[in-house]
Image: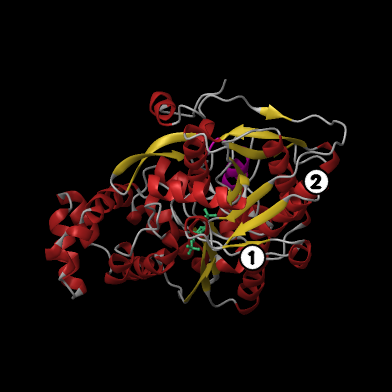
Amino acid sequence: ATQSVADQEAIKALFPNTYGMPLITFEAGEAVQLPAMNVGVILSGGQAPGGHNVISGLFDGIKKLNPESKLYGFILGPGGLVDHNYMELTADIIDEYRNTGGFDIIGSGRTKLETNEQFAIAAEVCKKHGITAIVIIGGDDSNTNAAVLAEYFAANNTGVQVIGCPKTIDGDLKNEQIEISFGFDTATKTYAELVGNIQRDVNSAKKYWHFVKVMGRSATHVALEVALQTQPNITLISEEVEEKKMSLKQIVDYMADIIARRANAGKNFGVALIPEGLIEFIPEMKTMIANLNDVMSTLEQDASYNKLTVPADKFNFIESRLEPNNAKVFESLPVLIKAQLLMDRDPHGNVQVSKIETEKLLIEMIKVKLDEMKSQGEFAGKFSDQCHFFGYEGRCAFPSNFDANYCYALGFNAYALMQSGMTGYLSSIRNTTAPSTEWVAGGVPLTMMMNMEKRHGHMKPVIQKALVRLDGPVFKKLEANRENWAMND
Ligand code: FBP
C-alpha cells in the first residue's frame, strides 16, 4: 500500500476508491490476443516535445493486441471531453505525426475538471463511444484532473479507467518512480542552443548584457539545466532565493555586483539567466501574491471593483484590500508589473508567470543601482541591456531521440496499465539512463503524489511539484562553478 506525500488523512478521505494502491512493475510475458477496447486520449496543459509519440505508442499498443480496438482523441484538452469534441485517430493520421513535436494532432487546453456535472458528461460521452479507458497526457495540474476523474469513475461504477502520462517541459513532475517528465530533455537542449548562440554574439560584440528569462512556471530545473550546458555569467535559482530569504533588493545587489566587477575588468557585457517563476519565490513577493490571490478570488462578484476602468484606481482598490505589508510591496512595483500581476489566473488558480516581465523589472532596478554605484565611484562601466523570453520556442521542438523513445514507451505502457485493469495510475518508465532495452515499465498511483494546496482561495488536492534540491548534485555543480563563470566568458 502507498501513502500520499503529505496530508494523508485529507487525501484518503477525498479518494476512498483510488487511495493506497500499490506500485506496479511489469515483467516480460507471452504475446497474447486481448479483447478489443475503445480508448480516449487527451493532451493537456502546455505543449511538450514528444506528445505525438505518446499517442503513437498508445495507438500501436491497442492495435497490436487487437486490431479492432479504437482510439478517440478529444480536441483541445480536457475541454474536448466535456464538450464532446473528438475525432477518431486512425493509422493514416497517426503516421503523419510520428516523431514530430507539438500537440497539433488534437490540440491541448487547460480546462480544470472538477464539477460533478463535468464528470457526469464525461461518463456519458465515454458510454456513447464504448470508451472504457482514458489517457490524460499532462503535468501536475492535468494529472490532478486525471486522479479526480479516476476517483469519480470508480465511485460511480462507470467502468471507465483513467491513466496519466508525465508531461511538462518544466521537469517538475518527478519523484523516485517518475525519473523525468517528457519534453524537458528536448526543451532544455533547444534553449541551451539559443543561449549558446547569444553567448557567442555577446563575446563577439562585447557591448550588451542579455537578460534571458527561461520557462519553468515554478521550479528552476529548466534554467539550471540550461546553465550547466552554457555557463552563463549569472544564473538565478528561485529555490535558492527562497531558501536564503533573498529580497528583491538583495537579488538586484547580487546581479549589479557581478556587472560592476566585470565592467571593472573591462567587460561591459554578459548573459544572465532568469527563471520564469522567480517572482513567486522572493519571500516578500510570495506572501504578497498569496494575499493577492485570495483578494482576487473575491473580486469576480465585487461590483465596486468591476466598475473601475482606470488601472491606477484598480491598483488603489487592491492595495486597500491587501494586508498592510503586502500593500506596501505591491505599491513599490512598477505599473507594468502591477498590471501583469492582476491578469487572470489560469483555470487551476496559478499566476500566469509567463506574462510577468521579471527580466524587465530586474533591468530597471539594476540601472538605478548602477547609477547609485557610479555616484559612489564603485562602477565606471556601461550597462546596455537586451532581453529575451525563451519558452514557446522550445515547447514544440522536434523531439530528441530520448524524448521520442521515452514518449513512445510511456504511451505503449499506458495501454499495458489499462489492459491490466488499472485506474488512477501514472505511466512510469524507469532506468532511463540505461539503454532503452533495459528500461523498466510500470505504474505509480496518482494519489501517492498528492498533497493539499490553496488554489483560488480554497484548499484543494493537487500533485506536489518537485522543486530543485539545493543539496542535490545538479545545483551543487552550478554552485561550485558560478564565480568562475561570472568573471570568465
Ligand atoms: P505545463 O506545466 O502544463 O506543462 O506547462 C508548462 C509551461 O510551459 C510553463 O513553463 C509556462 O509557465 C506555462 O506552460 C505557459 O502556459 P501557456 O501556454 O498557457 O502560456
Which residue is most to the front?
128
Picture residue at 39% right of the left edge, 53% below the top: 350
Image coordinates of residue 145 in percent, x first then y, are: 48, 45
| Real-space Cα separation, disc 1 to disc 2, in angstroms | 32 Å
Picture residue at 45% right of the left edge, 31% below the top: 15
Determine the image quadrant of residue 310: bottom left
Give the number of marks: 2
Q: Quadrant of the C terminus?
A: bottom right
Q: Main secondary structure of the magenta part?
A: helix
Q: For the residue carrying disc 2, how many other residues have a C-alpha within 10 Å: few (<14), some (14-19), or many (20+)? A: some
Image coordinates of residue 302 in percent, x first then y, are: 16, 60
Image coordinates of residue 199 in percent, x first then y, are: 63, 69
**In the displayed structure image, the side of residue 130 where residue 345 appears, left or right:** left
Please state which of residues 340 and 389 is positioned toward the viewer in this rendering: 340
Q: Which mark identifies residue 396?
A: 1
Determine the image quadrant of residue 394: bottom right
Looking at the picture, does residue 210 appear above or below residue 17? below
Pointer 2 residue: 66
Assess whether residue 412 is covered by the magenta stretch.
Answer: no
**In the displayed structure image, the side of residue 398 where residue 458 appears, left or right:** left
- What amino acid type is highlighted by mark number 2? Asn
Q: Which mark identifies residue 135?
A: none
User: Is the CB atom of the residue marked by disc 2 within 8 angstroms of ligand 1's nearest atom?
Assistant: no
In terms of sequence position, does the residue under pointer 1 or pointer 2 come before the other? 2
**Circle 1 — which element?**
loop
- What amino acid type is highlighted by mark number 1? Cys
Q: For the residue carrying disc 1, how many other residues have a C-alpha within 10 Å: few (<14), some (14-19), or many (20+)? A: many
Picture residue at 82% right of the left edge, 47% below the top: 64
Query: Magenta residues, as a range?
Result: 470-480
For the question of whether residue 148 can be seen, the reply is yes
